[in-house]
Amino acid sequence: MAFNSASLTEADLFRQDLDAGYLARYILDRNPERVEKSGLSAGGERLYDMLLHESSAYAVEFARTLPSAGISALTELLRRSSQILDMLEEALVQLANYRGGSDFERNYRQLVVNRLDQVELFGATLSNVSQRYPLSVAYLSLSVSGNAGFGLSQRVAPADVNVTPKANTALSSVEDALLPSRRLLIRGQAGIGKTTLLQWIAVQSARRAFTEQLERAGWNDTIPFFVRLRRYVDSELPTPAGFLHEVGKHIADEMPPGWVHEQLRSGRAVVLIDGVDELPSARRRDVKRWLADLIDAFPRARYIVTSRPAAAAKDWLEDEKFPFAELEPMNQSDVSIFVTRWHEAVASQRLSPEEREELVGYRDHLIGAIKNRRHLRQLAGYPLLCALLCALHRDRKTQLPGNRMELYDVALQMLLERRDSERRVALNDKLTRTEKTILLQDIAYWLIRNNASDALRTTVIDRLSQRLAVMPQIQYSPEDTYHVLLERTGLLREQVEGRADFIHRTFQEYLAAKQAMAERDLGHLVSNAHLDQWREVVVMAAGHAAPADRSELLTGLLTRASGQESYPNREALNLVALACLETSAERSPELDKRIRDAAANLIPPKTSDAADSLARAGTFALDLLSVSNPASKDEILNSIRAAVSIGDPAALSFLGRLARTEDVEVCSLLYQSWPRFDAEEYALIVLKDLPPPEGGLIIGDPSFATALKYLKGLESLVMVDRTGHVPQLGMDFLRDMSSLRVIQISGFTVAELPPISTTSLEEIAITLDAKHLISAEPLAVGSMRHISTLRSLDLLYPSVDLSALSSCTSLRSLTLWGVSGRDMADLASLRNLSRLKLLGLRDVADFDFLAPWSANLTELEIASEWCDTEAVSRLKGLKKLRINVDVRPNLAPLGQLSKLEELHLEGPFTSGVDLADIRTLKSLKELHVRFAKYLDLKPLDVIPNLRVTVSATTVLHGGQALATQNRLNRI
């Protein structure tokens, strides 16, 4: 009855895959009331259920024997095959979409590298006015200051002298500034490298080439989108689909639908927005709204915006939670590195041995000249001007300009009219340097007056047509003239097809100022001087002007300022007038008095812009600063910035007066300003009574070591070389530093250590990078036996006489490089060690040397060919273990380390490691596995709160629970 009422057919049987159990459930579902209505007892119901399952089994077997069953089965199989094919087709479409997105991403990344991995070093080649070099090779990381939460990376900041990152005011590297936030406003003056920085970020992102903390923070999984705002002066700001217009427009049609939106929404996108200052002020408000809309739609994406300070205040994007970072001028070490790289770029060309030798002489002479001449130090802090100095220094056989205006003038001569022998091309353009200058300055001033950074090619040609009408000696058509300027001047370019702009805005402003004075357009200059887009034009116009015109311009600025009711406008005009003193070689006494009176109201400076303008006025402003009494912290900080930027030794007494403070921020700035003056003189006058920085001091120039004796109470010192040349560092300076407790020496060769024996040091670190470790002479460490206070010793340095360390029984932490297993027996007396790192461990027959530390060791790192995990497992107190080996370790013994909280495994484990061996480690909080080819994460599901980090290339099985709870990270 049950079978009959179920209306069973062959199709039903095949739909149920001839499964007897499934068939019985099917019949019960079709007859739910049958048992209840039959009045069966509980036993009867169990019997009914048993008979139903048995009958279902017989029915299935019987159906298989029917003659028609084969045909029916075949029919069903064909039907199911069609379904499978449909499903496969759908899967293949999805796979094609995925592959399409993956292929497009790969092509886009390569295009970003091809387009943006290049930097122009002006004058760096004999055969071209400017030559492009790989940005990834030539890039020099700048220092930044600001509120972007620096110091998280705990790396030494790239400065000659700096406080440690513990203070919020410390200088830091750009890379550090990228760490804390997914949004960042970067401000910097003209020529300091804002666009170059964004290009570097884009290239590193496209190549997945970030290192250290940025790699661990997931930056190698980002996709860059570069947006130059100058392209949108008179057009709509781009939608996400338009982000490829700058880089990638030729492959945009291949982009999978919604691809950019997907990157933004997932948080992989890093949107690099360049040049807020290159837009008119009204347009900047549109940018702010556009950016806010983008963030609302895609809050997980990364956004980095650049601008000159005058166009974007520090809090300009505060509502969108953007911290800010200020790009700082290059310090002396940076300048030396930059000059060296510039000359290496030139030397990479086809030069004779004599020419290469001559280049070495030029390099050394220029580095010395910049170090010893104040006006050159001021110029060389900006990468653009430093490159021009390099080119002119070589071009003019070491003769250098005396100021910024002369530098631009001589640079333009070099760019517009090179000698035939240097160009090695036929000069057949028939335009003189004067004619080129007239045409270019007309274009430059037209762009400034129209608040534009670039213009359509046709618009520029129309402008040339008007100018050529009054230059009958030029026989070229406007179109031909345009191409001559584009191809033969090195100043005009088409970075975007059909749109012309200047190679750098500084040249545009210089030429525009020249044209403004040629037209005697003084009224227009005065009327616009309060606008940030005109500031540099007005300042350089004062330098171009004849004495009478200069006097009229400055008088106009001061008169307009005195009539302003708005304080910001009045201050801006007075600051521009004051800044004009930098370029004004000749002024009347009456005009000087008016400027002095106006400047008196600006001193002490209340803003960084005011400090910058004062600095440009040079010693004129220093005289006023020296008699001022800054009261608030902002006034003190900005007064220091102005005096330091002026750089005259006469500023030392004023800075010494401001040094009578314990304010952390003021002290930090005074320490950071040390490299701008003579090391010993500054230390004696300014730093002698200054409280030592709480976190310690970082020194990048070994010549400062002899002046350290004047610093009272300094407890922590880092000496770090950034040149890569591994200079030698003498240690005699330690004899006079009785208060020193911590010293870190990185990147130097250390000749001898005897002076260290007289200290009361508690922490010593002497390190070299990997490429210099092998070639360095071993360091005898015998003198350390006399330091009874020593608690921590890190020697990433070839060393001998390790047995001397056996008497350093107070040691708690020890790091050694390149020691042999035999040497470790000499250290058995150091039973108080709680932290041991053995890097480059060699000649290890067994790991029995670990036995003395079985009770106290809580942290161990082994980098060797192999590791005996049985010996490691006897260190029952271990909480942190890092193993970096070539041979896959046996993890089973590590399951006995019941207190282990952090485990790092690194090595080419082609067959992966068996993580099932460590599933008993219930206290484990972090697991890091790098370079493994394959990992099964499923055994780790039993460890609560575990966070796992693996290489992006590792093939994973399991781990779904970790991923869904955001406890799985791939790098």
Image (tube, rainbow, N blue to C red):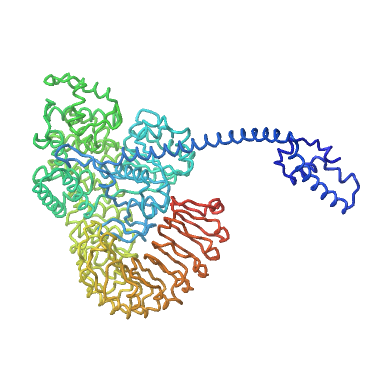
Q: Residue furthest right?
A: 39
Camera-nearest residue between 130 and 562: 130
Image quadrant assignment for residue 589 = top left
Camera-nearest residue between 955 and 674: 955
728 left or right, relative to 172? left
Residue at image x 80%, y 40%?
30
Camera-nearest residue between 819 and 441: 819
Residue at image x 81%, y 35%?
7
Above or below, 220 relative to 835: above
Residue 547 horizontal/vertical position (percent): 12, 36
The reply to whether residue 583 is in sight is no
Above or below, 348 relative to 697: above
Residue 251 horizontal/vertical position (percent): 38, 32
553 left or right, relative to 248? left
293 left or right, relative to 797? right
28 left or right, relative to 541? right
Quadrant location of the N terminus in the rendered image: top right
Residue at image x 75%, y 43%?
61
Image quadrant assignment for residue 467 = top left
The reply to whether residue 352 is in sight is yes
Above or below, 430 relative to 211: above
